[in-house]
Image: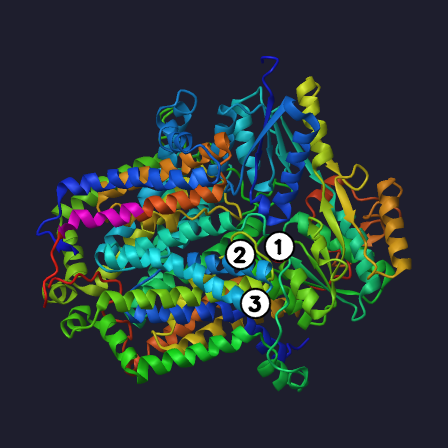
């Protein structure tokens, strides 16, 4: 049996969307020099807040806003801890994940299995029915297009605008940025909130669009994959998109290879998205000319304005 | 024990009662026990208990807290259940889906889910038009393999052209992965989805694709009448009430039960109108025949996948072979991992 | 305006007082949460922090269990802390823990049913080797292919989990287990068991190893050249290079140490408390240990205390679920709060709070 490339591509786009949303947000956070390992916690807050709102209001748009708001609220805790109280970022991020998973489960009690409104697709059926192109380009939920637009927007802002320049300056050398008069802490807090909003949107996509249910622990590690993708992409927006599609593509492909009953051990197929990601990373990184590591120099370092 | 001291029963859950699947049904049974015995009992539970060392501690603390009887509701708690049982000979232990009974105060119990799988396999065989049934497996363990075999045999019985495609999710619970697995199966041509994983995510995907599916562990009735056209429900309440009653009367003895549709431990959820009436009738007849003990889902002739004979004409599988089933029956085309 | 002023030296008083204040604040904030859930807050706090240690009913059992729970956390965190100090980010200790357990168990089971007393030491060596080998993948890739160790070590956790599932359902499955997943019981077989060394203390070889690791790490970090190099590399990588520190060697050494300790923790767990290889053998110790490492400020003594505190909240939290019906997620959120306050109040050790009148610039 041959694997149908059209449905594979459709699937990989769907599979990768929540992770892509969270990753592009985290990329901005890290570009500002902050490492927030709490993506998983923020995603699940987005999932639960989005689902609850979708159920009560019947409005997907409000659900997405609520998902973002819930995750931003959690991100603010991280912002206060790491930017104002100068707490360690790695530990604060992990604590955020723990807290977020617990809080989301508490908020979601009683919501499992409740109905949410169906989400309309933005493109008309006529477009969606074009063979090949239709399903791949026009069949998705609005958030899929939003996520890709977001990648483009982040790329433009980071590389072509003053805001992007300032953000990168803060992430590369906060002391120099401070000396130039930039408000390092404020900029970083804004970046952290943006990262929270994106992670929340990714979580809401999962609960409101993809699974259409609230289930405790439903993000099941997607936040960690998002973190990995940012590193994989060397902090470049378009490579986040490629990484998400590569990872989602292998994940979708391995399930299809199983369904096609090819004789590869399932444990190996199950591990293949991770293995392939590592192998691709090795191939890109070992190219000496392009190996200029793009990691923001100030990533994870504590900033304290001494003057 | 003082007269007014209620009999305390502890439950160890591997997941959360909010999963609307495996743990939810055990918790429903706990509530049924409370309702049945009223003030005479008191129940406590611990949720999301990891298997292994943590389980042993959880059970022990439960007993120190006053529990007189413990239900450990997942296979992975077997080691811990027996380890603690040896130290507390006066406490009654009931371990779900396990096989270890190292001490006289440990019983094991499980349900013949494969009887339910036979009924939904029968429905699937009738309903599929593409003749491809997609099956989401969790891990390649006897419980899951037995279910696949049972569903396949009864689908093939009514539809000789039916094929099963199995995708292993390597998780019991990950909604996103389960949804992706369902989608992969649909893209491979499946128009009926069965699952042996715990979340409702495959139901959502089936709904969007306009195909049919079956509720797993709990009824998943919110997806009725379609895609969910029927379901296999784990109904532990009758057993829990019976065993608690026996423990309180002092008539409890060690046991190893494997009950099915006959005692109501396995329940077939409402078959919806999406199933043609004659199929509903034949499925109900199959269910009733199993319940009455007139028919066993593994009745020969059945060959193993490699073509060797397993059961001769009219021969019925023994429980030992079923419990440890690690082979596919003839006609299934995939390989079992490992 | 409130401003923070960096102290020349971290305050010892706040270094010790901060965590105490954090626990008090957690009790208040957590108490509000419990009250909102309709649970008696005083009772809940007492059960979480007091009962595992001092209640007549539970303490006799819970106190040793603290060591059992804290042992692997401390052991793994000690290994991680050295790398973290040098700026080497091993996020995948969970994977090294799993591979260590698989290798150790496989070694022990290969000799089954022999009860030779050399088998257990062999298992420990195999487990350590497994952990080191798994950690060497990100280490060597970092040194020779310049890949990022955070990413590689994290992704390898998932690969290790797939290996674990395959071992439990396939090649390490108990041949007498009638097809059920999971290996033979290692803890109840003489030769492969990691027993309680002194009855009723919870002390097994793994806990002992954790204590030894704390002491050795303390000596290395304060007295040994390697400790100096690690600190230098973390604080001033360029200076370290000029100072003769070989960065490649340091990466391999730090990753190796953390892999070795994580692997050892895996063997001690699989041959003792967990008793066997099963599909869900790993319960996140490798990730929790990262929190423990930072909570302990990457200091061996701090890690010891942080590990015990985490274990206390696990065990006390369980008692609160049991006795008061506190939902498990509330305990998780409570732990998160505790960590927030602990991390936030670290600021007082390093900074002085000053109230300044705003001056026009």
Label number found at residue B199: 1
Q: Is residue C188 visible?
A: no
Q: Which residue is mark 2?
A: A218
Please provide percent x and percent y for residue B81. Answer: 56, 32
| Residue at 66% over, 70% down | A260
Task: Give left or right: position of B311 versus C288.
Answer: right
User: Which is in the foreground here, disc 3 or disc 1?
Assistant: 3
- Is residue A30 found inside the magenta-colored segment of the image? no
Mark 3 or mark 2, which is nearer the start of the sequence? 3
Q: Is residue C277 in view?
A: yes
**Location of mark 3 (residue):** A60
Residue C49, relative to residue B301: is it above or below? above
Local packing at callout 3 (Cα closer than 10 Å; few below 14, some 14-19, many 20+) is many
Q: Secondary structure at mark 2?
A: loop
Callout 1 secondary element: loop
Relative side of C278 to C299, left or right: right
């Amino acid at each position: 049996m041959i694997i149908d490339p059209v449905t594979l591509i459709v699937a990989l786009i769907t599979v990768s969307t929540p992770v892509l949303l969270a990753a592009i947000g985290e990329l901005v956070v890290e570009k500002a020099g902050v490492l927030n390992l709490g993506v998983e916690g923020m995603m699940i807050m987005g999932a639960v807040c989005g689902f609850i709102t979708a159920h009560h209001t019947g409005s997907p748009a409000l659900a997405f806003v609520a998902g973002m708001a819930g995750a931003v609220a959690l991100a603010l805790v991280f912002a206060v801890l790491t930017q104002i109280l100068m707490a360690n970022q790695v530990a604060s991020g992990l604590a955020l994940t723990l807290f977020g998973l617990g809080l989301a489960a508490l908020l979601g009690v009683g919501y499992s299995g409740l109905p949410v409104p169906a989400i309309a697709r933005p493109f008309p059926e006529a477009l969606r029915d074009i063979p090949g192109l239709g399903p791949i380009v026009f069949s998705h939920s609005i958030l899929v297009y939003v996520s890709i637009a977001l990648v483009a927007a982040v790329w433009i802002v980071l590389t072509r605008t003053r805001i992007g320049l300032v953000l990168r300056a803060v992430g590369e050398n906060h002391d120099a940025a401070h000396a130039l008069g930039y408000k390092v802490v404020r900029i970083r807090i804004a970046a952290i909130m943006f990262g929270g909003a994106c992670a929340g949107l990714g979580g809401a996509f999962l609960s409101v669009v993809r699974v259409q249910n609230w289930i405790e622990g439903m993000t099941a590690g997607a936040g960690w994959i998002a973190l990995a993708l940012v590193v994989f992409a060397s902090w470049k927006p378009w490579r986040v998109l490629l990484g998400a599609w590569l990872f989602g593509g292998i994940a979708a492909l391995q399930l299809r290879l199983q369904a096609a009953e090819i004789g590869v051990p399932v444990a190996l197929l199950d591990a293949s998205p991770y293995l392939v990601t590592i192998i691709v990373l090795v191939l890109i990184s070992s190219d000496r000319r392009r190996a200029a590591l793009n990691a923001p120099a100030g990533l994870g370092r504590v900033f304290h304005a001494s003057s | 024990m003082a007269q007014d001291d209620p009999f305390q029963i502890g439950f160890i859950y591997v997941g959360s009662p909010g999963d609307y699947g495996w743990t939810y049904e055990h918790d429903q049974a706990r509530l049924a026990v409370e309702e049945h015995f009223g003030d005479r009992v008191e129940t406590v539970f611990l949720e999301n208990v990891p298997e292994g060392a943590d389980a042993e501690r959880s059970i022990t603390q439960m007993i120190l807290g006053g529990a007189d009887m413990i239900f450990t509701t997942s296979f992975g708690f077997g080691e811990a259940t027996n380890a603690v049982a040896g130290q507390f000979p006066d406490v009654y232990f009931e371990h779900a889906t396990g096989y270890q009974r190292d001490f006289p105060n440990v019983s094991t119990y499980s349900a013949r889910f494969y009887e339910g799988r036979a009924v939904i396999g029968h429905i699937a065989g009738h309903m599929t038009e593409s003749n491809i049934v997609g099956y989401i497996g969790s891990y390649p363990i006897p419980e899951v393999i037995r279910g696949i075999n049972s569903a396949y045999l009864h689908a093939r019985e009514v539809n000789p052209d039916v094929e099963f495609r199995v995708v292993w999710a390597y998780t019991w619970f990950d909604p996103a992965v389960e949804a992706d697995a369902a989608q992969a199966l649909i893209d491979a041509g499946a128009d009926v989805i069965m699952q042996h994983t715990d979340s409702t995510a495959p139901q959502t995907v089936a709904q969007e694709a306009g195909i049919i599916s079956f509720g797993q562990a709990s009824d998943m009735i919110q997806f009725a009448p379609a895609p969910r056209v029927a379901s296999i429900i784990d109904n532990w309440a009758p057993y829990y009430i019976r065993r608690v009653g026996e423990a309180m009367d002092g008539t409890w003895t060690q046991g190893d039960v494997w009950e099915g549709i006959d005692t109501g431990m396995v329940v077939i959820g409402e078959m919806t109108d999406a199933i043609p009436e004659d199929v509903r009738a034949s499925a109900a007849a199959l269910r009733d025949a199993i319940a009455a003990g007139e028919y066993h889902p593994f009745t020969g002739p059945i060959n193993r996948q490699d073509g060797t004979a397993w059961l001769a004409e009219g021969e019925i599988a023994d429980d030992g072979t079923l419990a440890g089933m690690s082979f596919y029956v003839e006609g299934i085309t995939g390989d079992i991992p490992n | 305006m409130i401003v923070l002023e960096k102290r020349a030296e971290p305050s010892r008083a706040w270094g010790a007082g901060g965590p105490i204040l954090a626990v008090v604040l957690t009790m208040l904030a957590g108490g509000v949460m419990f009250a909102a859930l309709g649970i008696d807050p005083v009772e809940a706090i007492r059960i979480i922090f007091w009962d595992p240690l001092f209640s007549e009913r539970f303490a006799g059992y819970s106190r040793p269990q603290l060591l059992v729970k804290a042992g692997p956390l401390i052991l793994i965190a000690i290994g991680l802390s050295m790398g973290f100090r040098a700026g080497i980010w091993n996020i995948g200790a969970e994977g090294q823990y799993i591979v260590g357990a698989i290798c150790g168990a496989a070694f022990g089971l290969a000799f089954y049913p022999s009860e030779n007393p050399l088998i257990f030491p062999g298992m420990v060596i195999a487990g350590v080797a497994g952990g080191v080998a798994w950690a060497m993948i990100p280490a060597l890739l970092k040194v020779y292919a310049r890949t990022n160790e955070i990413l590689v070590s994290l992704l390898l956790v998932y690969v290790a989990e797939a290996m674990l599932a395959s071992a439990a359902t396939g090649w390490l499955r108990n041949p007498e287990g009638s097809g059920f997943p999971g290996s033979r019981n290692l803890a109840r077989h003489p030769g492969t068991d990691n027993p309680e060394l002194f009855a009723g203390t919870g002390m097994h070889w793994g806990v002992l190893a954790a204590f030894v690791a704390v002491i050795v790490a303390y000596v290395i970090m304060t007295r040994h050249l390697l400790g100096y190099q690690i600190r230098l590399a973390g604080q001033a990588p360029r200076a370290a290079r000029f100072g003769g520190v070989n960065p490649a060697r340091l990466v391999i050494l730090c990753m190796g140490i953390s892999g070795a300790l994580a692997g050892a923790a895996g063997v001690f767990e699989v041959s003792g408390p967990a008793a066997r290889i099963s599909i869900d053998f790993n319960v996140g110790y490798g990730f929790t240990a990262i929190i423990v490492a930072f909570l302990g400020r990457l200091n061996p003594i701090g890690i010891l205390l942080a590990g015990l505190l985490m274990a206390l909240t696990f065990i006390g939290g369980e008692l609160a679920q049991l006795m008061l019906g506190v939902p498990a997620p509330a305990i998780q959120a409570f732990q998160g709060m505790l960590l927030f306050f602990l991390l936030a109040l670290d600021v007082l050790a390093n900074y002085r709070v000053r109230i300044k009148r705003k001056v026009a610039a």
